Image (cartoon, rainbow, N blue to C red):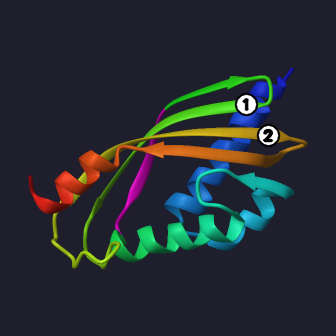
Amino acid sequence: MQTAEKDNKETVAAFIEAFWNDSDLDCADRFLSDDYAELSYQSKEGLKQFAATILGAFPDKRYTVEEMIGQGDKVLVRMTVKGTHLGMFFGTAPTGRTIDVTLYRQYRVAGGKITEHRGWIDMVTMWRQIRGE
């Protein structure tokens, strides 16, 4: 028998793969609920805009889930993103340097849809890697 936590983790894993790795930004409408609350990027559209910025700056980016924990309706994810800085990133011209940064995500899932997201990224490390420090 499949548990709700396992279902929720599968939903989040499928979203990460489609949205972040396959760059299918339109899949957000399939994975995110109508009342979705985006607590990091202000809105569903804000999330899509940030993802487009990442895609433009790091076209070879790849997200790897390192750890995923499901508890009730929450799914916590620790993952890394690796990529090469080949496009503009918040006013910084491409450097050709690679990044390898840890991210943390918290999702809330109900009825097979993601209803809430908040995320944290180690931006200090990311900027140091971009600048070659």
Q: Where's residue 9, x and y in %?
A: 69, 35
Q: Label 2 neighbourhood size at 10 Å, few (<14), some (14-19), many (20+)? A: many
Q: Where's residue 28, x and y in %?
A: 71, 64
Q: Where's residue 41, x and y in %?
A: 59, 60
Q: Is residue 3 left or right of residue 15?
A: right
Mark 1 is on which residue type? Lys
- Closer to the camera in the image, 52 or 5: 52
Disc 1 + disc 2, Cβ < 8 Å: yes
Per the image, label 1 sits on a secondary structure element best described as strand
Q: Main secondary structure of the magenta part?
A: strand
Total labels drawn: 2
Q: Is 71 placed above or below 86 here?
A: above
The earlier-in-sequence mark between 1 and 2 is 1
- Residue at image position (91%, 42%) is 111
Q: Is residue 123 left or right of residue 55?
A: left
**Over which residues does the magenta segment extend?**
60-66
Residue on which disc 1 sits: 74
